[in-house]
Structures are given as C-alpha cells and as structure tokens.
Amino acid sequence: MKKIIALLMAMTMLFALAACGNGGSSAPAGSDSAAADQAQPATSNEPMDAEITESGYVVDGGFLYYAVTLHNPNTEYAIEIPSYRVTAKDESGNVLGTMEHTLSVIYPGQDFRYAFQGFSCDKEPADVSFEIIPGADYNFSKVSTLDHADYQPLEVVSASLSNDGFSDSVLGEVQNNNDYDIDSAIVVVYFRDAEGNLAGGIGTFIDHVPAGGTAAFDINVYADIATDNFEVYADNWM
C-alpha cells in the first residue's frame, strides 16, 4: 500500500512539473507577437513638404531679383498655398532683407517655378538662402478632392527675347493642354549666367488660357538682368 501511495505521489509530481514546463514556454496569447509587431517600423503615407530644387538671384538697382523652383515629392497629395522664405545676409551674418511668399498649388510629382522682384538690397549679399516654411494639415489635399483631379502643366511656345532700345521683353504664348479653362496663369522667365547658373528672373500674370488653346504674354524686363540664356515657364494660378 505504501508503495502504491509513493508511486501515485511521484506521478503527481511529474505531471505538475510537466505542466509548469509547458506554461513557461507558452506566452499569453498575443504577447510576443504584439511585441514583434511593435518592433517593426510603421509604414506611413504622411504628406511631405515641398522641396526647393533650384534657386538663384541677382541684385540690380538696389533690388534682389530671384527665381526658385519648388517640387512636390508626394504621389497622392497636392500641396496648396506652399510658402517659402528668402533671406539675404552680408559677410558678417547681418540680415540685409527677408521676405515670405506663397504660391498656388503643386500637383503630385510636379514643379512650380516662380521668379519676381524681391526686397530692396543696399549692397551685394554674401549669402541668400531659400527655405520651405513647413506646411499645416490644410496645405495638403488628396488630388481627388480638388476641383480638377488631373492637371497637365502649361507649356510655353514660341518664346523670344527682344529689346526696343529702352527695355527687354520676353514674348510668346502659353498652351493649355487640359480639357478645362485656366482662369489665371503666371508666366516666369529664368535668366542664367554664362556658366548656366540661375541668375534671377521676372514674371507676369495673364488671364484666361482656354482649354486646348493658347494665350499670349509679354514680360517687360526693366531691370538690367536679362541674358541670352533664358527659359520661360507657366503655371496655373488658382
């Protein structure tokens, strides 16, 4: 009888040890997998700010004339009213002038080019910086929510530079390849130096570029900034 009791007690202890062993190796449901999931980098489709891909300037007549290209790196979001800051400093780091400016809308993967007269500048700056001002939530919109989900960039055709003895002019036409009218557009000319560096620019606005049609432009360049090496661009000004 004692042998039977001892045998039963031994078997009970073995079962208990086996049960404890199994409990240690099996984590509560979801604990290890949840930790593993948290360790994985989260995928995100958060909108990104515009990027400045090219910029340049020239000082003439006490004013800074600049040109800047903004690029939308997003694939799903349009950037509405993106803003940037231009700041000129002297060799000691003192601010000679600064300004902020806002554009219209940049569709995904597209560029927006802008050139105009900036702020007054008493002397040649040692440095001119261009920086994007970070956007808020309202600056980013899914293209499907816009009035026009598709936008084909405007084309400039037959652009030429002329001089009447007093000032330079850049003339040509803007071609609208969209199936809707463009109520207002901005046309800018980029001037480059002999090395091909962007050296400022100027622009103008035109109204009503019809769907599938063209509209003429005439950009007067009163400052002494024109060069024979130039490019002309147009974009929708919503």
Image (cartoon, grey):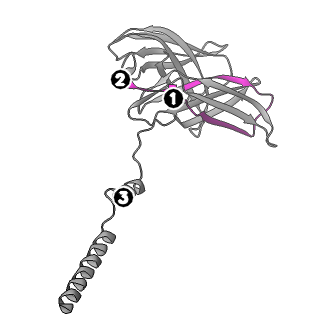
Q: Quadrant of residue 176?
A: top left
Residue type (three-letter) at the residue carrying disc 3? Ser
Q: In this figure, which residue is indicated by the disc labeled 2?
A: 144
* Residue 146 visible, this orientation: yes
Q: As displayed, is residue 144 above or below residue 179?
A: below
Q: Say which label, 3 or 1, has the lower sequence index.
A: 3
Question: Which of the two discs, 2 and 1, sits closer to the camera?
Answer: 1
User: Bounds of the magenta span?
Assistant: 114-143
Q: As displayed, is residue 216 above or below residue 193?
A: above
> What's the residue at 50%, 19% (across, down)?
160
Q: Say which label, 2 or 1, has the lower sequence index.
A: 1
Front in this rendered view, residue 24 or 104:
24
User: Helix, strand or loop at disc 1?
Assistant: helix
120 falls in the magenta region: yes
Mark 2–mark 1 distance (CA, rounded to whole Å): 16 Å
Q: Position of residue 98 (x, y in %)?
A: 72, 29
Q: Position of residue 139 (x, y in %)?
A: 51, 26
> Relative to residue 144, is residue 52 drawn left or right?
right
The crowding category of the residue bearing disc 3, from other C-alpha atoms within 10 Å (few below 14, some 14 to 19, many at least 20), is few
User: Helix, strand or loop at disc 3?
Assistant: helix
> What's the residue at 20%, 83% (across, down)?
8
Residue type (three-letter) at the residue carrying disc 1? Asp
> What's the residue at 81%, 38% (across, down)?
94
Front in this rendered view, residue 185 or 227:
185
